[in-house]
Image: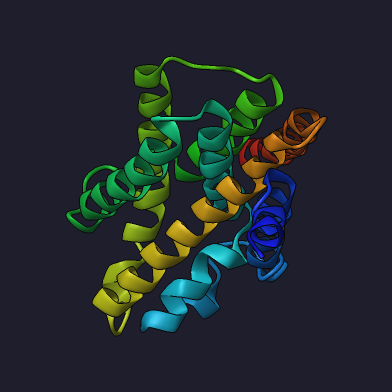
Amino acid sequence: MEGHRQSIFTRPALARSGVILALLLVLAQSPAFAHSAKDMRGGFLAGFEHPFTGPDHLLAMVSVGLWGAFLGRPLIVALPVIFPAVMALGALLAMFGLPQPPIELGIAISVLVLGGAIAFAWRAPVVVACAIVAVFALFHGYAHGSEIPSLADPISYSAGFMLATGSLHLAGIGLGTLNTLPGGTRITRAIGGAIGLAGAWFLFTAVT
């Protein structure tokens, strides 16, 4: 029995479980982009759905978890904590009417840079990685904070949104478990490359 239990909790088994979790969360999105009119309703479910409806937000949030998993401790924990915390700050800044930064441009660059960091296996220092994630989180938070005041139930909406954000970070960490498999690092870097290419497309559409 003990031997059987050990065979279940091997690294390949954990990696497969993590990838399955990640795919389920990522595939839950609809093909629409973020900031659509249908997301302007309030409530917990609407908030939870919102990150899954925008490929730009979704890929950035998955990338945070995936890059953290690639970098290992302490960033596997720190990055998924910093992103939602600073995103909440960005939302507050937007709600108080501070001058609006180039939101779509910043979000597109976040996808490009985070995907590129994974693709090129950039082992950034802890402080640098945290700063990068924090800056990008401000753009994502500002984008959603500018929408919250028009919602019927902003508190529930925000709670749902934050839970979905955490789920997407976990999805990225789940993909990062591929690193425990032979050749898994090449796979995660390829995923990062694909994310970076998507970010390049988002940037192109943002500036044209």
Tell me, yes or no, if residue 55 can be seen here: yes
Tell me, yes or no, if residue 41 can be seen here: no
Q: How is the image coloured?
A: rainbow
Quarter of the image with the C terminus in it: top right
Q: Residue at x 65, y 20 (%)?
A: 121
Q: Residue furthest left?
A: 96
Nearest the camera: 71 or 83? 71
- Position of residue 129 in the picture relative to residue 8 (left or right): left
- Position of residue 72 in the picture relative to residue 66 (left or right): left
Q: Position of residue 35 (x, y in %)?
A: 52, 64
The mark total stands at 0
Q: Position of residue 155 (x, y in %)?
A: 24, 75
Above or below, 176 relative to 94: above
Q: Residue at x 75, y 32 (%)?
A: 193
Nearest the camera: 22 or 92? 22
Quadrant of the rendered structure where residue 160 is?
Answer: bottom left
Q: Residue at x 21, y 54 (%)?
A: 92
Above or below, 81 relative to 92: above
Q: Residue at x 46, y 65 (%)?
A: 164
Q: Position of residue 15 (x, y in %)?
A: 69, 49
Quarter of the image with the N terminus in it: bottom right
Q: Position of residue 147 (x, y in %)?
A: 36, 66
